[in-house]
Image (cartoon, helix red, strand yellow):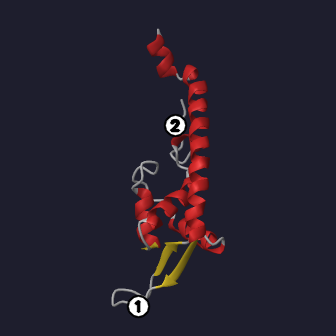
Amino acid sequence: MKEIDSKCACKGSTLVRFIQPIILASLCEGPNHGYNLIEKISQTTIWQGNSPDATGIYRILRDMEKRGLVKSYVEAETRAAIGKRVFSITEEGRQCIGNWIHTLRQYNEGIKDIITRLEPFTPEIEKNKK
């Protein structure tokens, strides 16, 4: 049997759509740098310690800023590095959280349905039924 690529969606590697609600939840805790947000994302259960692509995260943050969900400013220079961009959630972003909760609950129900449909075809489950 052919080994499934670790980047296959069936292995959970394409969870990009879940990044926005994680960013919003993280920013509800307080303003943060992009790098720290990436670390928080990687620590969520859904990402299981794997770091998402930093370029993609910054692209999502820019898009969220254009849409008014977050705002940012460049922190003053420090000795260690040039100024870092600090992101915070806006009122529109807080309102978006309610939409995400509704959407994620729908996804959750849909995922439960898919699992129920797939379980009869899983070899391990079929072996245990005998």
Is the residue under label 2 in contact with that under label 1 (CB below 8 Å)?
no
Residue 66 found in image quarter = bottom right
Q: Does residue 21 appear left or right of residue 45 in this picture?
A: right
Q: Amino acid at mark 1?
A: Glu
On the question of residue 44 being in view, the answer is yes
Residue 10 found in image quarter = top right
Q: How many marks?
A: 2
The residue positioned 60% from the left and 30% from the top of the image is 113
Q: Which residue is mark 1?
A: 77
Q: Does residue 69 appear left or right of residue 44 in this picture?
A: right
Compare residues 91 and 86 and report the one nearer the observer.
Answer: 91
> Is the residue marked by circle 2 packed among few (<14), some (14-19), or many (20+) residues within 10 Å?
few
* Vertical order, 12 against 1 (above or below): below
Q: Which residue is mark 2?
A: 3
The image position of residue 70, as x and y in percent, is 56, 72
Provide the secondary structure element on which disc 1 rests.
loop
Please tell me whether mark 1 or mark 2 is closer to you in this view: 1
Q: Amino acid at mark 2?
A: Glu
